[in-house]
Image (cartoon, rainbow, N blue to C red):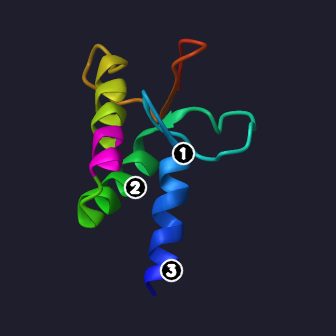
Amino acid sequence: MNEGIDSAIGLLRQCSTKNGFIASTEKLENYENVWSRDGCVVGLASLIARDEQLIETFRANLLTLVKHQGKNGEIPSNVNVEKAKVS
């Protein structure tokens, strides 16, 4: 069981960026975006794992979403920070 957990945490670390979690380590369209739903699920796992690096990425994920929040308070589905594209 620990091997699987360690492997999962390792993969999450690979998907950690300064702006939050991305969907894949592969360069695929939209997979480099910071996602609200996926980022929150991974963020909860980060808190459970008590992994400081992942918790910091979760914080960055939330801050990225807040930075791109709509004028009426809506949170974007995803954000491509490099292209300044919000969905």
- Answer few, some or many: residues within 10 Å of disc 3's Cα (few below 14, many 20 plus, some between 14 and 19): few
Going from the N terminus, do you reach mark 3 or mark 1 first? Answer: 3
Q: Which amino acid is tagged 2?
A: Val
Camera-nearest residue between 26 and 80:
26
- Answer few, some or many: residues within 10 Å of disc 2's Cα (few below 14, many 20 plus, some between 14 and 19): some
Where residue 38 appears, x then y in whole percent? 46, 50
Residue indicated by mark 3: 3
Measured in 3D between alpha carbons, the distance from the residue under mark 3 to the one under mark 2, in whole angstroms, is: 18 Å
Residue occupying the point 29% across, 24% down: 66
Question: Which quadrant of the structure image shows residue 58?
Answer: top left
Q: Do the residues labelled 1 and 2 touch (CB within 8 Å)?
A: yes
Q: Is residue 53 magenta?
A: yes
Residue indicated by mark 1: 15
Going from the N terminus, do you reach mark 1 or mark 2 first? Answer: 1
- The image quadrant where one finds the N terminus is bottom left
* Vertical relation: 5 (above or below) 32: below
Residue indicated by mark 2: 42
- SS type, badge 1: loop
- Answer few, some or many: residues within 10 Å of disc 1's Cα (few below 14, many 20 plus, some between 14 and 19): some
Residue occupying the point 29% across, 56% down: 51
Residue span colored magenta:
52-57
Q: Do the residues labelled 3 and 2 touch (CB within 8 Å)?
A: no
Task: Say whether residue 26 is left or right of residue 17.
Answer: right
- Tell us which disc is closer to us: 3 or 2: 3
- Tell us which disc is closer to us: 1 or 2: 1
Residue occupying the point 58% across, 46% down: 23
Where residue 57 appears, x then y in whole percent? 36, 39
The circle on residue 7 is: none
* Vertical relation: 83 (above or below) 15: above
